Amino acid sequence: MNILLLGSGGREHAFAWKMSQSSRCTKLFIAPGNAGTSLCGTNVELAVTDFDGIKQFCIEHTIEMVVVGPEEPLVKGIYDYFKNDPAIQHISVIGPSKAGANLEGSKAFAKAFMQRHKIPSAAYREFNADNYEDGIAYLQSHATPIVLKADGLAAGKGVIICQNHVEAMAEFELMIQQAKFGDASKKVVVEDFLSGIELSVFVLTDGEHYVLLPEAKDYKRIDEGDKGLNTGGMGAISPVPFATETFMQKITSTIIDPTISGLKKEQIEYAGFIFFGIIKVGDDPYVIEYNCRMGDPETEAVLPRLKNDLVELFEATAAKKLHEIKLETDNRQTATIVAVSGGYPGEYEKGLLIDGLDLLQEDDAIVFHAGTKQEDDKTVTNGGRVLAVTSFGNTLQKAVEKSRAILDIVEFDGMHFRSDIGYEFY
Ligand code: AMP
Ligand code: GLY
């Protein structure tokens, strides 16, 4: 079968790497892809939100399955676009309907959904220009820290943890009155602050059944010791030591099962991944956020541990037969370290030569590309997060050491990475 994968980051290189190993995959195309994905299939110059262009491409190349990496096309309704068009409705789309993608596309929708289905999550209120004064009064009377969330997609920047009332009211004003995040912050969710350790939990669901993938933990801050600015993710580990069987059981019974049955009850079509951003408060799991896609860089730590054929999993998803699948995972530890451009998450240069990629001959390690581009015979930087190196190890420390050793060989001007991924668990 011919498959089109949408996206261009480390997550998509990991998908492409895994799918290209499947005997079910005839031709793999990646739009727009990066230098790494071009080693697994053919890159196509198409934007992930160019639905008409994607449709034409699918028809011309007899694509039978579209796998959607990032959230934006999902929130914009790519699933529905395919299902409502007789010319392409036979093509399987791996990703939720627009209504399902709202779990990520609207924080207010996600909170109300959790409330309807009694899924544990922080207490909240939602405000907009109409009840703005109520919002101010609510903030004034509420304990701090307090969390403000732009309702819509805001490129991962829409969540602000405010330490005091002055900051909270200023941010609230900026979001609602000054459109700090454009339309995304016309509505704001104000949520209680939860204190605990975070965990990324993933399922692949066909809307009726689901399989639970290996869990992961990501490291969002730019500097070691979880200091400095928030990034898209500087590394990830899988498995996660505190994700014990008992804790995962609690997540399954109080969060995953009610989410899947809630989607079903509300007749929301969902054939794709759900990423549960979990926080452990005391011994109990709470949902911090839903995403309608896999995590990045978590995917780079999770997929190498998956023994199943990923394309077969996707076929079972499209056929609503996931209950027939048994997941098999590699018990070893993975650790992913992300190498980023100098200056990231602020301004950074692109087009810098990446050296040393041809010298790598490591067993048990994979160099996933994130922001890279092929220019003739050279691989150059093309984004903030440039590479995501995943290694296996019998211990966490060994896995981290191996990824680190690889990043001693690879080099580009200004390269920065964290050596302390997984540090709390050594
Ligand atoms: P999000 O953009 O939804 O992924 O949120 C970004 C980050 O903000 C999360 O990964 C958490 O670290 C933090 N966060 C979000 N909501 C809360 C909350 N209610 N309490 C504490 N931290 C939160
Ligand atoms: N690593 C977090 C995310 O993908 O949203």
Image (cartoon, rainbow, N blue to C red):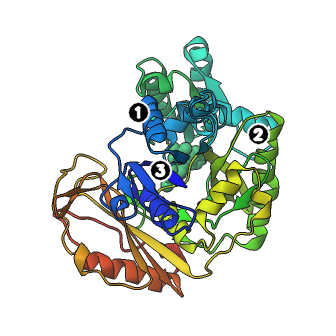
Q: Which of marks 1 and 2 is in front?
A: 1
The relative height of residue 260 versus residue 385 in the rendered view (above or below) is above
Residue 293 in view, yes or no: yes
Q: What residue type is labelled 3?
A: Leu
The relative height of residue 14 versus residue 84 in the rendered view (above or below) is below
Task: Give the mark nearer the N terminus: 1 vs 3.
Answer: 3
Q: Pointer 1: residues within 10 angstroms few (<14), some, or many (20+)?
A: few
Residue 212 image offset from top left, x and y in percent:
70, 62
Residue 292 image offset from top left, x and y in percent:
59, 44
Circle 1 sits in a helix, a strand or a loop, which is it? helix
Outermost residue on the top side: it is 130
- Residue tagged by mark 2? 263
Task: Give the mark nearer the N terminus: 1 vs 2.
Answer: 1
Circle 3 sits in a helix, a strand or a loop, which is it? strand
Image side of residue 315 versus residue 236, left or right:
right
- Residue tagged by mark 3? 5
Image side of residue 49 versus residue 123, left or right:
left
Point out which mark residue 53 bears: 1
Q: In this figure, what is the number of numbered marks? A: 3
Point out which mark residue 199 bears: none
Quadrant in which the N terminus is drawn: bottom right
Compute the Cα span from label 1 to label 3.
14 Å
The image quarter in which residue 103 lies: top right
Q: What residue type is labelled 1?
A: Gly
Q: Pointer 2: residues within 10 angstroms few (<14), some, or many (20+)?
A: some
Q: Which residue is drawn at 53% across and 61% down?
A: 25
Compute the Cα span from label 1 to label 2.
30 Å
